[in-house]
Image (cartoon, helix red, strand yellow):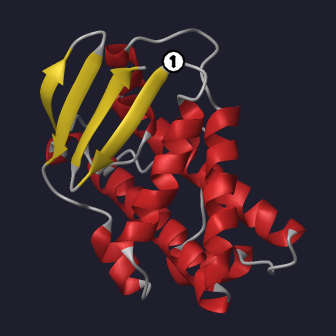
Amino acid sequence: MSAFLGPIHHWLYGKIQFQEKWIQSILSSAKENGWGDFEEKLDSACGAADLRPLEDSIDQGNIHGWLQQKIHVEEARLAVLVTELLKADASRIDELTEISFRFGKSNAPEEKLDASEAFQLLNNTLLDGMPCDHVNQLLENDKDIVVWQQTQCLHREFWEQAGGDVAVYYALRMRMIQGLLGESGLIFAGENGRFEIRKD
C-alpha cells in the first residue's frame, strides 16, 4: 500500500468502522436486555475502537500496519463479545441474529440494486482482511446473479482464540446481510464458502 493516504485506505477504514458500528449495536442491545456492560472488557481484552476520521488517527509512517492492526482489533472485539454473551446463555443466539438483522436493515441502501451492485455493496461494507488477501473470488457476475467463492477464512483464528465457533460469526453475518439487502428484491445465500446473490 502507498505511504500516502488514498481512496483505498478510506475504503478499508470505512469497512472497519462499519464492523465497529455492528459491535456497538450488539453492546447497546446487551445493555438493554440486561446481559451486562462489556465495553470496558472488550477494550481491555482486544483494544479500544477508534471511530475518529482516518486522518486524525492513522499512523502516517505505517499506514499498512496500522490498518492491519485495526482489522485485528475489530475481528477480536466481535468474536470475544459474541462468544462471552453465548457462554453465559447459549439461547441468546436467536436475539443476536435478530440484532444483526436489524442492524443490517438500518443500513440498507435506499435505492434498488441489481445483483452486481449488491455484491459491490457487500465488498464495500464487510471486513474480509486487506485487499491484498483476495478473499473473494468471483465465479459469475451479472445483474441477475453473482456467485463467489471465499478463498480463505480470515475470521476463524479470532473466534478460536476467543473460545468460540466461527460458524456463529457466519450465522450473524448472514442475517446482517439479509437485513442489508432485505428491501432489494434480491436473495443472499451460501454455505461452505460459496455464496451467491440472485434476483428473487
Q: Percent x, y for residue 50? A: 60, 55
When the figure is inspected, residue 131 is found, relative to residue 61, above or below; the finding is above
Q: As rendered, which of 189 and 128 lies closer to the eye?
A: 189
Q: From the viewer's perspective, tell me whether residue 89 is left or right of residue 158.
A: right
Q: In what quadrant of the picture does the N terminus appear?
A: top left
Q: Residue furthest front?
A: 200
Q: Name the residue located 29 percent from the left edge and 51 percent from the top edge.
A: 129
Residue in the picture at 27% in, 19% down: 145
Residue 11 visible in the picture: no
Q: Is residue 196 visible?
A: yes
Say few, some or many: other residues with alpha carbon within 10 Å of mark 1 (under 14 / 14 to 19 / 20 or more): few
Give the image quarter of residue 182. top right
**Looking at the image, residue 139 lies above or below residue 13:** above
Query: Which one is nearer the viewer's eye here, 42 or 28?
Result: 28
* Amino acid bearing label 1: Gly
**Where residue 136 sits: x, y (%)?**
20, 40
Q: Position of residue 70 (x, y in %)?
A: 43, 58
Q: Looking at this view, is 1 or 159 the one in front?
A: 159
Residue 7 sits above or below residue 192 on the image:
above
How many numbered marks have been drawn onto this rendered protein structure? 1
Q: Helix, strand or loop at disc 1? A: loop
Residue in the image at 21% along x and 56% along y: 192
Q: Give residue 62's position: percent from left, percent from top.
A: 31, 52
The residue labelled by disc 1 is: 185
Residue 59 relative to residue 36: left or right? left
Q: Quadrant of residue 7?
A: top left
- Left or right: where does residue 173 sit relative to residue 93? left
Rendered residue at 51%/57% (across/down): 172
Quadrant (top left, top right, bottom left, bottom right) of the C terminus: top left
